[in-house]
Each structure stands twice: as C-alpha cells, then as structure tokens.
Image: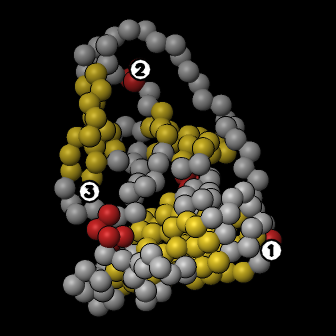
C-alpha cells in the first residue's frame, strides 16, 4: 500500500492494537488477514486536491483503493505521541515447547501444512490451557512454486520473535494474529494459550490456499 504521490504516512497499530511507538513509512506490506492503522497528514494538500491509497499487487497489478479529497477546511492540528503503548515481551524461556509448521506449496494446486491437508475429523495439535509455545512457521517451496503465504492463528495474539533469525521490523513488533511468510522464509512467534479452551484453526489466509488444504486444527 502506498499513497499515489509517494508521500509518507505513519502506522500506529497492527492486528492486536497499538504499537509501542509510531512508525513512519512510505509503503506498507499487508497480506490477507493482516490489519494496520495508519495516520495521514492531509494538511500538505491544496483545497480540492485528490490523493489515492494505491494497492500494488504481488502479481504486478496496481489500482486505486481509496480516493481522498482535501476540502480546505482548517482541521485540528494533531501531534502523535512518541509513545503509544507498552507491550511487555513474552520471554522466550517461558516457552514449554517449539512446534514447526511447514507451509508446503506443490504443483497442481497442492497446498499442505506438514504434509497434511485439512481434515475436519483430525486434530493436529493439542495444547494444555495456560501453556506458552513458540511456533516456527516455514514457507517451503516445492519445485518452481515460490508463493508467499499468510499464516493466521485463531484464539490468540502472538509476538514475532524473529524472521530468518533477525528481529522483526518496528511495524511488526506488536501483537499479531497473522503474518506474511515469503518463499523460503522462517518466522518464529510466541503466544500464551491461557484464556479459552476449545477447538481452533490455523491456516493460510489466502482463500485459494486454505480451500485447497493449507489449514489445520488445534485444541486447547
């Protein structure tokens, strides 16, 4: 996502609420299921001037998603605080176990997690209530199928520990429930399963991928 004049904007929140601090940027990558709140300063535009929020698709297409028009009215000046939130990191040593989820893309519309397609009659993971776990999600291309995936977890919000061993960028350093995983990339995140029991899903949030089997079930 960009503004059509490439001007900068500020992200203040992600899937699970406010970031610790505002993050200024010129573009924002969002996969299906991810959310972000941004602040745009329209005082830079003249009365009647239009600006568009553009979507640059992974497939190469571009389109105007939203059109804004400056109306010339003097608004209330707003200054973002330097601090928005205090997110307490979940210590990695609190984790009782690490689970690995290989998102596998094959030919002819084959999408699997750990070699298995979704089965409503199968529970893939059982987690004790109150547990803290690290999930390691890998995008495993097979053959020529280098496709990004959007890994989404129901029930909990998580904190990203690292992406290919590096700390997450500031705009991902908040509470999340969905994360983009590029081909060949590994994302590790940590979460506490402490509030609810029940049966939940994890899946790729790209509709075609989950419909073709890239989904599993976990029970707390």
For label 2, the residue is: 43
Left or right of 66, for residue 88: right
Q: Where is residue 1 shown, x and y percent of the image?
A: 35, 47
Which badge, 1 or 3, comes first in the chain's sequence?
3
* Callout 1: SS: helix
Specify the quadrant of the image occupied by residue 157: bottom right
Q: Nearer the viewer, mark 1 or mark 2?
A: 1
Q: Which mark is residue 93?
A: 1
Q: Which residue is mark 3?
A: 57
Residue drawn 43% across the image and 89% down it: 115
Residue closest to the far top: 73
Q: Can you say whether 14 is above or below 82 in the image?
A: below
Above or below, 151 against 81 in this view is below
As helix, strand or loop, the secondary structure at mark 2 comes to helix
Q: Are marks 1 and 2 in contact (CB under 8 Å)?
A: no
How are the residues colored?
A: secondary structure
Q: Are marks 1 and 3 in contact (CB under 8 Å)?
A: no
The quarter of the picture where residue 110 lies is bottom left
The answer to whether mark 2 and mark 3 are in CB contact below 8 A is: no
Rendered-image quadrant of the C terminus: bottom right
Number of the label disc, if any, that sits on residue 75: none
- The picture places residue 169, in percent across and down from the top left corner, at 56, 59
């Amino acid at each position: 996502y960009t503004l059509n004049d490439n001007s900068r904007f500020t992200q203040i929140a992600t899937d699970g609420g406010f970031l610790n601090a505002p993050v200024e940027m010129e573009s924002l990558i969002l996969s299906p299921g991810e959310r972000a709140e941004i602040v745009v300063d329209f005082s830079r535009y003249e009365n009647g001037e239009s600006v568009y929020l553009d979507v640059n698709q992974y497939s190469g297409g571009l389109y105007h998603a939203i059109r804004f028009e400056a109306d010339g009215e003097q608004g209330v000046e707003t200054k973002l605080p330097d601090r928005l939130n205090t997110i307490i990191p979940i210590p990695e040593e609190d984790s009782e176990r690490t689970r690995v989820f290989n998102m596998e893309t094959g030919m002819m519309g084959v999408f699997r997690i750990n070699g298995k397609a979704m089965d409503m009659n199968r529970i893939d993971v059982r987690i004790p209530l109150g547990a803290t776990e690290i999930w390691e999600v890998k995008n495993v291309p097979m053959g020529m199928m280098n496709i990004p995936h959007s890994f989404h977890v129901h029930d909990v919000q998580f904190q990203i520990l690292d992406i290919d061993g590096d700390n997450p960028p500031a705009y991902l350093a908040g509470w999340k429930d969905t994360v983009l995983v590029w081909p060949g990339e590994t994302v590790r995140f940590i979460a506490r399963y402490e509030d609810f029991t029940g049966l939940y899903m994890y899946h790729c949030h790209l509709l075609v991928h989950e419909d073709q089997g890239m989904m599993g079930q976990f029970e707390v």
